[in-house]
Image (cartoon, rainbow, N blue to C red):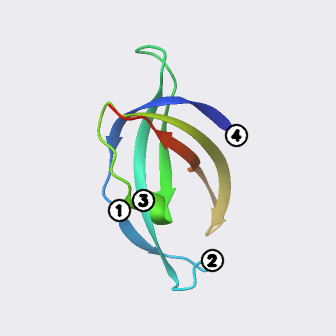
Amino acid sequence: MIKSLFRVVKCGEPFTIKSEKSESGQVQKKYIHLQEIGGKFSDQYVATLLGKDAACNFYPGDVLAASLRAGVSEYNEKMYQDILVVDFYKFNK
């Protein structure tokens, strides 16, 4: 688990995906590009927001305290890594 302060670099638009874990069979998903606070060469991540979190608006320069969880899944005999935002707090400007 990665817990840190991040600056939003870019945020995508929400879209709907199929989900076996959701009662409706669908869930909202959005990608967000984050960079750790600390300088030009700080670590960067492209993470996923799911459900109600995907409806939140983020803009370049927004500052978040967030927890990221990395996971791996297999599909068609290929491995895929996903980074999920599991908890966040958005600071007001």
Kind of residue indicated by mark 3: Ala
Question: Dot 3 corresponds to which residue?
Answer: 54
For the N terminus, which image quadrant? top right
The x, y position of residue 16, in whole percent, is 40, 72
Work out whether mark 4 precedes mark 1 in sequence or the reverse, and give the earlier one. Answer: 4
Question: Dot 1 corresponds to which residue?
Answer: 14
Q: Is residue 85 above or below residue 6?
A: below
Give the quadrant of residue 28.
Answer: bottom left
Kind of residue indicated by mark 1: Pro
* Residue situated in front as seen by the camera: 91 or 26: 91
Answer few, some or many: residues within 10 Å of disc 4's Cα (few below 14, many 20 plus, some between 14 and 19): few
Question: Dot 4 corresponds to which residue?
Answer: 1
Work out whether mark 4 precedes mark 2 in sequence or the reverse, and give the earlier one. Answer: 4
Inter-mark Cα distance, 4 to 1: 24 Å
Which residue extends farthest front?
A: 92
Kind of residue indicated by mark 2: Lys
